[in-house]
Amino acid sequence: MKTLRAVITGTGSYAPSRIMTNDDFAAYLDTSDSWIRERTGIRERRIAAEGEATSDLAVEAAKKALESADLTAADIDGILLATATPDIAFPSTACLVQARLGATRAFAFDLNAVCSGFVYAMTVAKSLVETGAARRLLVIGSEVMSRSLDWKDRGTAILFGDGAGAVVVESSTTVSRGLGSFRLGADGRHWEMIHVPAGGTRLTKEAATIRMKGGETFKMAVRQLQESVLEVLALDGVSPAEVALLVPHQANVRIIDALASRLALPPEKVMVNIDRYGNTSAASIPVALDEAVRGGRVHEGDRVLLTAFGAGVTWGSGLLTWEADLQKRSRT
Ligand code: ACO
């Protein structure tokens, strides 16, 4: 039997049209455009319209990913949706997306690892594809973080935004590398570092808004991202200098800069779009990857490194070789 490799063959993303700038916050909060830009790298973020939910964003991103893979929804065997902000408690948002896309053959489930959700979902997708359990998957990260914000808390409200990104992951006997090593981690002892204390079965009287220990999160993120990235690079025998593009979770540009400098990666090898979207949690990596691909920053054969850290706390990294065109040309 030929070895099955998992490979990305399409990407897509979607952001709500409403833009909220730093000055919009400064108009009612004790903050300023310069503080937000200097401390986080964020200039503006997108905010979902009233009535626009996580599945609406996910469907738009998924349609674009399918189009770029030259596939239709009927070709898809499964939908993995990473989100911490589902439309409703159940069923899963992935099922709502499956129905809207008309992906009638696809199984569908949500996965919640908050900001690390997309890397977690890609790890599951790789396993499903490489064991032959599925041939073609849609992996989506979609969030409406704006509905979990305390708009009066300047320490968190300014950080987050809404968006969705998607990729098609296919099995291939043609590509030689595709998705390489992926490794995940979690340390639930730090669950309070970033959390929403309500909305689930632990009945509390607290509001369902984000609480975060920003400084602690910052320090742990830098340390853990570096460790996680070095682990997957070592597993694949790749040096940081061989990485063509780092696509990190976009939580704070200073976290990204610290990681890039520890890996000695120059700015042209680091994808940053936090200035336009803020932190979109599980959506941030697939949105950044889609923009990198469409912007001509990813070429056949390039090594692309994904890495994320988020609530849980959770983290994960994955190394892939971009072989989308090779796989599309070899489809029978
Ligand atoms: N405008 C102006 N001042 C502010 C603002 C603001 N928006 N926010 C905080 N400050 C103030 C603080 O009150 C504090 O004032 P004080 O000294 O009078 O007490 C001062 O600025 C410094 O506060 P710090 O918290 O030390 O600021 P810092 O430089 O650490 O930036 C930030 C805060 C942006 C939150 C940063 O810590 C950070 O990005 N942390 C990581 C967040 C992250 O990675 N999250 C990822 C996971 S999210 C998820 O999984 C859902």
Image (cartoon, grey):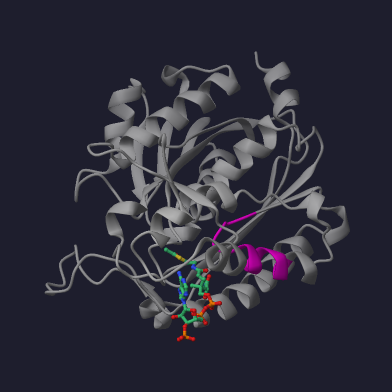
Residue shown at 53% from the left, 28% from the top: 65
Residue shown at 28% from the left, 40% from the top: 53
Q: Position of residue 184 (x, y in %)?
A: 55, 64
Number of numbered callouts drawn: 0
Check the image and report above or below for 315 versus 107: below
Left or right? Give the position of 163 relative to 273. Answer: left
Q: Which residues are magenta?
A: 248-259
| Residue 28 lies within the magenta run | no
Q: Front-most of 180 and 47?
A: 47
The reply to whether residue 1 is visible in this rendering is no
The reply to whether residue 328 is visible in this rendering is yes
Q: Position of residue 117 (x, y in %)?
A: 46, 55
Q: Position of residue 38 (x, y in %)?
A: 61, 67
Quarter placement of the C terminus: top right
Quarter placement of the N terminus: top right
Check the image and report above or below for 231 versus 328: below
Left or right? Give the position of 286 relative to 117. Answer: right
Left or right? Give the position of 74 relative to 197. Answer: right
| Residue 256 lies within the magenta run | yes
Residue shown at 63% from the left, 68% from the top: 255
- Which quadrant holds residue 5? top right
- Which quadrant holds residue 109? top left
Left or right? Give the position of 261 relative to 86. Answer: right
Q: Front-most of 331 and 322?
A: 322
Q: Position of residue 174 (x, y in %)?
A: 74, 28
Residue shown at 45% from the left, 55% from the top: 23
| Residue at far front of view | 27
Q: Front-most of 207 and 238?
A: 207
Q: Front-most of 211 and 176?
A: 211
